[in-house]
Image (tube, rainbow, N blue to C red):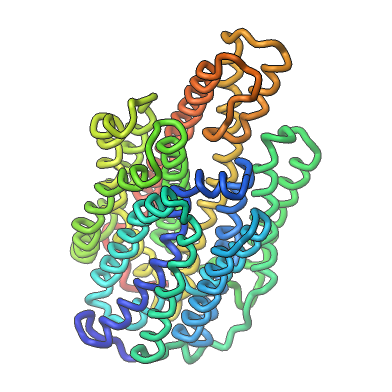
Amino acid sequence: MATVALRSTAGKWVMVSAILASAMAFIDGTALNVVLPSLQKSLQASGADLFWILNAYLLMLASLILIGGSMGDRLGRKKIFMTGIFIFICGSAACGFAPGVLSLVVFRLIQGVGGALMIPGSLSMISSSINQQERGKAIGTWSAFTTVVTMGGPILGGALGDAGLWRYIFFINVPIGIAALLMLWLKVKESRDEGNQQSLDFPGAITIALGLALVTFGFLRMPALGFGNWQICLALVAGVLFLIAFIIIEAKSKYPMMPLQLFVNATFSGTNLLTFFLYAGLGAGMLFMSLNLVQVQGYSQLQSGLTFLPFTIMMISVARFAGALADKYGPRLLLIFGPAAAGVGLLILSFVKQTAGPGDYWTTFFPGIIVFGLGISFTVAPLTAAVMGSVSDHFSGTASGVNNAMSRIANVFATAIFGALSVLFFTGALQQQVKTIKLNPKQKQEVMAQAADLGNAKVPQGIADSKVIELAYHQSFIKAYANIMRIAAGLGFLGALMAVLFVRTKLKTDKT
């Protein structure tokens, strides 16, 4: 397919449709984080239920996104992109009507299938449709708009959550998806790799799905059953074996969904490792900061969402500029500075203790959010451009799928592992708090039983001084939050190290 200029009519339609569809997928995560307290109360969900609601979508997305990219390259990028959008909006509508936790988890799985076809399609269409000289700027524009919408998600989620309308987080996807479908159908031409006759790698998809699901199950059940429980050990061991089997299948498959030869390119390998570490830290940081603001610091859900507004403003002003800098000077320095700055921001946020509420925002959370936002703003466009620029055009869909899979796999592990760690940190801190409070053994047991609900822990009935117990819950959550944020900061620094070790100043012209 002949490429077009970014400012041409055809180029604009490609960009608008790709941004609209991507925004639907990306807004779910950030908006849902903010409304989790409302959702938990409405559906009477436990802390573990919340992590499953988050991970059900991510599991399917991470497992199938690689096949989604390959299907677009082979069967037609526009066709697969539109199919993904349709499945996603159907799953979204079903989520909006879900009567309970189990049905919501199932419908989130359907959303994940749609997202797996839709998300790689957006970048693949941009890379295959926009001419090479403007591709970095196009990807920067896409990154800026989708990240703005993603970071604007908490504001929307907060407003809907405070109004008791958390279900509209899902319903809002329907008109956006329909608009994107109409644009693609009427204004965007089909593109595919005409020489691609590969069969689809279903064995690979099945093994990675089982591996991720078992590892997630093991970590999320660990706080309740204990690390030494046979169910936990069996799930974790089986999950790791399935993930090893996935690598073996990919190495031996004639048509792998994750071609291992792509990783021979140092920049491709380094940027995907950077993506894994940075997005694991990003996912954990945003989730636990949102829970902290609403459940412990006394923010409304809208106020919690508004705390990310400076982040959004920086993304508008910086991300496209960063993409242009990457085109001109190469991505390496930006990919060192950006993740390192994000790590510093998360570290600053980890030192925030109990505050007096939103009135203290400017001297507590604001400085960390500014540094964190600056780091992410200088990272997203150069990172995506480096990934897509390190492979040849006919691998564009696969490369997009691999990189998106890395970010989703990072989120799966972050939600599962940090979910388990947070309960362990919270329980340990609460045990220390309870030792100083005069309670009988039964009351202590009842107080500790609430630890699985983290910041939503409720003071058991029959305890006279409920304020002391509530303070103990808050202090314990803040301790757990601090530990999680510091680990997340370390992951940001690891991402910067990957850029130092692997990313070249200029991308090779003889691509893989």
In the rendered image, residue 153, in percent from the top left (x then y), is placed at 37, 56
How many numbered marks have been drawn onto this rendered protein structure? 0
Please name the residue shown 59% across and 33% down the image.
423
Residue 124 to residue 506: above or below: below
Left-right relation of 437 to 129:
right
Front in this rendered view, residue 430 or 44: 44
Q: Quadrant of the N terminus?
A: bottom left
Q: Percent from the top left, x then y, of residue 211? A: 68, 56
Q: Is residue 8 left or right of residue 382?
A: left
Residue 194, above or below 423: below
The answer to which of 344 and 99 lies nearer the viewer is: 99
Instruction: Return the residue nearer the eye: 500 or 118.
Output: 118
Residue 159 seen = yes
- At 29% from the left and 81% from the top, the residue drawn is 130
Q: Which image quarter holds the C terminus? A: bottom left
In depth, the one of 388 and 441 nearer the eye is 441
Above or below residue 489? Residue 20 is below
Q: Give the quarter of the image for residue 326.
A: bottom left
Image point (40%, 73%), residue name: 176
Q: Quadrant of residue 432?
A: top right
What residue is rendered at 70% in x and 52% in y? 214
Residue at the limit of the structure toward the right, as seen here: 230
